[in-house]
Image (cartoon, coloured by chain):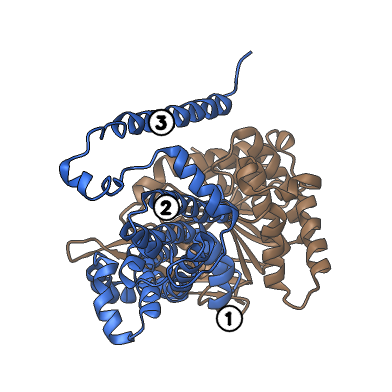
Amino acid sequence: MKAFLSVENLTQRYPDGRGGSTTVFEDASFGIERGEFVCILGHSGCGKSTIMNILAGLAEPTSGVVVMDGAQVSGPSLDRGVVFQNYSLLPWLSALRNVTFAVAARYPGWSKAQVQAESRKYLEMVGLSGEVVHRKPSQLSGGMRQRVSIARAFANHPKLLLLDEPFGALDALTRGTIQDELLKIWAGTGQTVFMITHDIDEAILLADRILLMSNGPMARVAESVEITIPRPRERTAIVTHPNYYAIRNHLVQFLGQRSREMAGRPGGGAPETVRIDLTGGDSEEPDARRGLRAIP
Amino acid sequence: MRLSLNQRAALLSVLLLIAGLLAWEVSIAAGGGGGAELTEYEKLTGGGAPKAGVPPPSQVLGKAWEQLSNPFYDAGPNDKGIGIQIGYSIYRVLAGYALAALVAIPLGFLIGMSPVAYRALNPFIQVLRPISPLAWMPLALFIIQDSEASAVFVIFICSIWPMLINTAFGVAGVRQDWVNVARTHELGPLRTAFTVILPAAAPTIVTGMRISIGIAWLVIVAAEMLVGGTGIGYYVWNEWNNLDLTSVIFSILMIGVVGMALDAAFGVLQRAVAYAE
């Protein structure tokens, strides 16, 4: 049984200017289930953004395929919404018009009033209402711009939502608030989300599963770490969960050391699944052992 | 009392104007006051012809009052009101300019969107652009066989380049992020062009249009001096032939005022399409 989104043997090579080619990543394969929230972590240059662009249909891989919901991905589509790090709002349109622009593209048959109502609903979900929605992006703070961008993406009900380091340019406090809003809106919609991030704590808070990429060149998706912390999650509460630091330590170890050791070594195939659960509960023996092995 | 920056600047402008006009008036009164002794020849010819001199500003102001109080009179081919002459010039400028915009903006779009079109057309643009528009005049007169249309053609050819180049530049420089927004929303090529690329490139395009209208207004004066018949350029030349320097100075001022008004109109348009990133 194939996953809802299946990424198979994705490889990206660029000419290196000396006649040869540089392999950014090779044989990257992974799957995402419907309704899942998956984060991908890895160092700069491992090709995370390239993978995202391929999923969005904005870039072509050198080889490999992406299959979503039974159909191969080729070219951009309304079924795959993207939130870019730099917001990508159209600066000559107000916040509201940026959202109606997208809703009207998604539902061409809708009346103006319907489009307006839907757009306002999603802007309200991210805490933007009243006079603010008539401002141009340049008159909004970075946090507000990213809220508009998130509202625009969710209002389109894509089958897959792609978030490219959406909070990378925001200060820590704003980031926290918008993460909470994202969690809330995600819980309400059951949207499938694939997100790039550099922030380990952010990934643990948001994700069902974290994909870990080794360093480039010849990066690959090496591990898939399950986040065994029950939802709904609160940023203040999850840090006291017994699994939190066990998972966090595993991620830090990977990014700090093992990702480097793996660099340049060909490998591939599906990532190794890692499940760390110290609560004892329903975890099976091999998983628990693997978890313990991973924590030095 | 402290005056604001604008008030101080306005005050200084008025002072400079008054000082300039006074200096002009005084210098002419001092220079033109001589001529006491008539020569033998002048006595014979009955006091001599009146000497043509640069008129003082008071005389120019009088002329302006006289002309502007009845700008649209028409007393034959060589005696038309300033309003009619400027009207002809504006009509020619706008006709040539509109034709140029109709060609330059779509073509600029094409060049901006397609690297092949850019490379293919670039050599032609680079050769044609530096040609003085007036150099086209003989060819235009010969081919078109109509002086009116030739003047319009000269305006067309001089105002096309800034619009073409700026449109191509603006369209090519549209941020890839915005194009990606259009792509991920499955906008067709036409909707992408009108809802994303055009507004994104509009400030650059309008800047090109503003440069073009300025050049067109510069060129129309020279073109009308050559073509003759009507227009502000012809008016200046005709008054020079009549040795009526008062009218020459007055029409020079009018050329400046109209040029400023055209530029200001495009300034308004430029502010309307501007956006902050």
Residue at image location 36% in from the left, 46% down from the top: A260
Residue B147 picture location, percent across and down? 36, 79
Q: Is A41 above or below relative to A241?
A: below
Q: Is residue B178 left or right of residue A174?
A: left
Residue type at tag 3:
Gly
Q: Is residue A214 left or right of residue B225?
A: right
Q: How many marks?
A: 3
Do badges 3 and 1 share one subunit?
A: no
Do badges 2 and 1 share one subunit?
A: no
Q: Which residue is mark 1?
A: A71
Viewer-nearest of discs 3 and 1: 3
Q: CA distance from mark 3 to mark 1?
A: 79 Å
Residue B41 picture location, percent across and down? 17, 46
Q: Is B52 above or below relative to B187?
A: above
Residue type at tag 1:
Ala
Disc ID at residue B247: 2
Q: Which chain is rendered brown in the image?
A: A
- Residue A48 seen by the camera: yes
Q: Which residue is mark 3?
A: B20
Determine the image quadrant of residue A109.
Answer: bottom right
Residue B139 picture location, percent across and down? 25, 80
Q: CA distance from mark 3 to mark 2?
A: 19 Å
Query: Between residues B77 and B86, which one lies in front from this camera angle?
Result: B77
